[in-house]
Amino acid sequence: MNKSDKLDELRLEVGMIADRVSTRHEFYLGIINTIGKHLPKRFGVAIYLSQNGQFSYLIGTKHISEKKLVKFGEGMFSICSIRGKVTIDSEEGKTKAYAPFYDGHHLIGILYVECQNAEYIVSDEDQIFLHEITRFIEVKGKYLKTSIDNYEC
């Protein structure tokens, strides 16, 4: 199966998540688990939320080298949020992708994906895929409950 077919299959799987969950936290968890089960070793995917002057790790799977908390104005999370689009950063033998998602003009969070350069070449097709997933999060996330047991998502 080529990359395009794999990404199409993943789009379909992610697209069905909103129909099976009732909270935003379950929605985020479903997206991370669905993408994560398709990732090989030494890859990772996570969601960071924008809150209280920092980007806070909410949930992730596999290999994540980013800090759990990153202050606004520091690092690639801030650069991505300023650009307002998928941002790719290659360093230290790995490629990191940051894809912001919003509620109107309010930044909600960033979908973060990390991969080892030797194992995968990031293409425009991957950036389009990440943009589509974050757009899906924006559209479907609005219709889900925002808290679970007093935990804000």
Image (cartoon, rainbow, N blue to C red):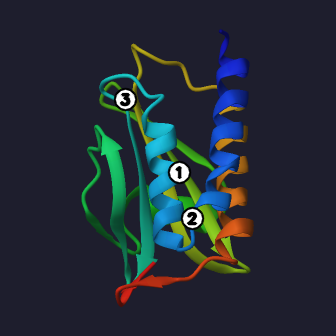
Q: Give the residue at mark 3.
A: 94
**Which label number is shown at residue 134?**
none
Q: In percent of the image, x 41 and y 64: which residue is there?
A: 48
Q: In percent of the image, x 64 and y 39: which residue is there?
A: 13
Q: In percent of the image, x 70 and y 67: which residue is there?
A: 140
Which label lies toward us, 3 or 2? 2
Three-letter amino acid code of the residue under disc 2:
Val
Check contact, mark 3 vs mark 1: CB within 8 A.
Answer: no
Three-letter amino acid code of the residue under disc 1:
Ile
Decide: is 82 above or below 15: below
Which label lies toward us, 1 or 2? 2
Q: Give the residue at mark 2.
A: 21
Disc 1 crowd rating (10 Å Cα; few below 14, some 14-19, many 20+) is: many
Q: Earlier in the sequence, mark 1 or mark 2?
A: 2
Q: CA distance from mark 3 to mark 2?
A: 33 Å
Q: In percent of the image, x 37 and y 31: which residue is there?
A: 43
The quarter of the picture where residue 62 lies is top left
Is residue 89 visible to the viewer in this orientation of the structure?
no
Q: Secondary structure at mark 2?
A: loop
Decide: is 135 above or below 95: below
The quarter of the picture where residue 33 lies is top left
Is residue 11 visible to the viewer in this orientation of the structure?
yes
Observer-nearest of 138 and 143: 143
Disc 2 crowd rating (10 Å Cα; few below 14, some 14-19, many 20+) is: some
Q: Give the residue at mark 1.
A: 31
Disc 3 crowd rating (10 Å Cα; few below 14, some 14-19, many 20+) is: some
Check contact, mark 3 vs mark 2: CB within 8 A.
Answer: no
Residue 31 in percent (x, y) is at 53, 51
Q: CA distance from mark 1 to mark 2?
A: 11 Å
Q: Quadrant of the C terminus?
A: bottom left
Q: CA distance from mark 3 to mark 1?
A: 22 Å
